[in-house]
Amino acid sequence: MIPILYLSHCGSSIGGGEKQLAYLVTNIDRSYYHPLVVCPDDGVFAEHLRAADIPTVILDLPPWRKAKSLMARYSAAKKLAALAKAHNAQLIHTSDSWFNPYLWCLRKQLKIPVISHVRTLLSPSQVRKYKFDQMDRIISISQESTIPLVQAGVDPQKIDVILNCVDLSVFQPASVKADSEEYVVGIVGRIEPFKRQKMFVEIAAKAGAQTDKVRFHIVGAALDLPAHRAYNQEVHQLVAKYQLHGTVHFIGHRTDMPKAMQELDLLVTLSAGSVIAEAMATGKPVIGTPIGSTAEMIVHGVTGYVIPSESTEDLANKIIELATDRMQSASMGQQARKYAEETFSVETHVQKAQNIYKKLLKG
């Protein structure tokens, strides 16, 4: 078997990146590959991996570029190299590109190939800062995410695009959805600036001014970080400002995400990510803006809509259109499920990753 070392963004919580990493390591060909996941902290994600019989190690990997981490990062890199040697790792794959400097060190020391997974939209300067040119291979979750890589001088031949996936056996349309006068629109993800829940509240305010038949769900919670706590407070304050307590509902963190998706009629995403695949697999249309992988995952006019502008009014009007025409919304949801089956399967995702491993290991 070929040992592969994976670096996870975190072990204490489960976001989109952690879900995608779990899909990969739990479905990889275990007769051929032997995964070991390194998490910088312990918690629900690390426990999830252990429960799935995935070897997991907790090793703090402090931010490479912060001055306060100067001494700690070299100690962490040394421990990581020792772990890779003990595991006899033949390849290292980071699920978080901010760990690229650690991969750069390991690549130099151990002379083994390294892969960085790009899950966010970077700037060319970030690409240069985080040594993407030193990676043997880069996996991007969208074509759009490859643009700054190429602009920063990364060889396009090093880049592969693999869309996010979803477990189609778990995320399924509800067998029966209760009829309701209210149309439920949700945004799903951690409450943080990147997910843009404040913009979602602005959209809810504009839609609510035109109809009282639409209810908005904010599904997710803020991490216990100062910036996230502050943003969470701002989102609540905005709901109070617009007097939307009866329209916008904070659902909180959900561990039963398939059921949470089934409770929606429509998903709105303002940051892209794996929630698009999850909603579509559950038979829900999706509305988003052209950021990240959104335009590549939604078939405009078929499985949902990609609104070219970031106008809250345009987004609100499209929501009202679907809320008013329930047959159109249901039809789009059916098309979304069909498209998810064709495009977002775990098997396809894992096979594409394994093809990259085979090419690197042959080299």
Image: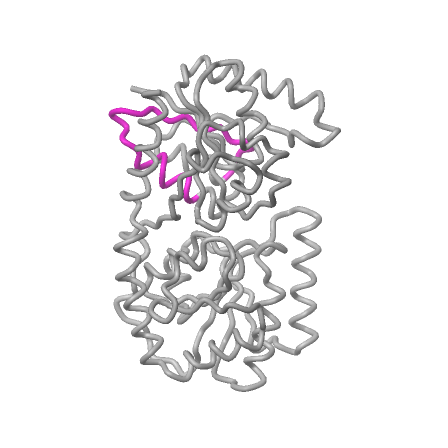
The answer to which of 44 and 156 lies nearer the viewer is: 156
Question: Looking at the image, is 1 positioned above or below residue 349?
Answer: above
User: Above or below — where is 205 with respect to 147?
Assistant: below
Picture residue at 60% right of the left edge, 42% below the top = 124
Image height check: is 97 above or below 35? below
Q: Residue at x 43, y 33 (%)?
A: 158
How many numbered badges does the structure rendering display?
0
| Left or right position of 2 against 141 | left
The quarter of the image holding the N terminus is top left
Residues drawn in magenta = 19-43
Q: Quadrant of the C terminus?
A: top left
Q: Position of residue 152 (x, y in %)?
A: 58, 39
Q: Nearer the viewer, residue 108 or 176?
A: 108
Q: Residue at x 34, y 22 (%)?
A: 361
Residue 132: x percent and y percent? 54, 33
**Relative horizontal placement of residue 349, taking residue 221 as reference (left or right):** left
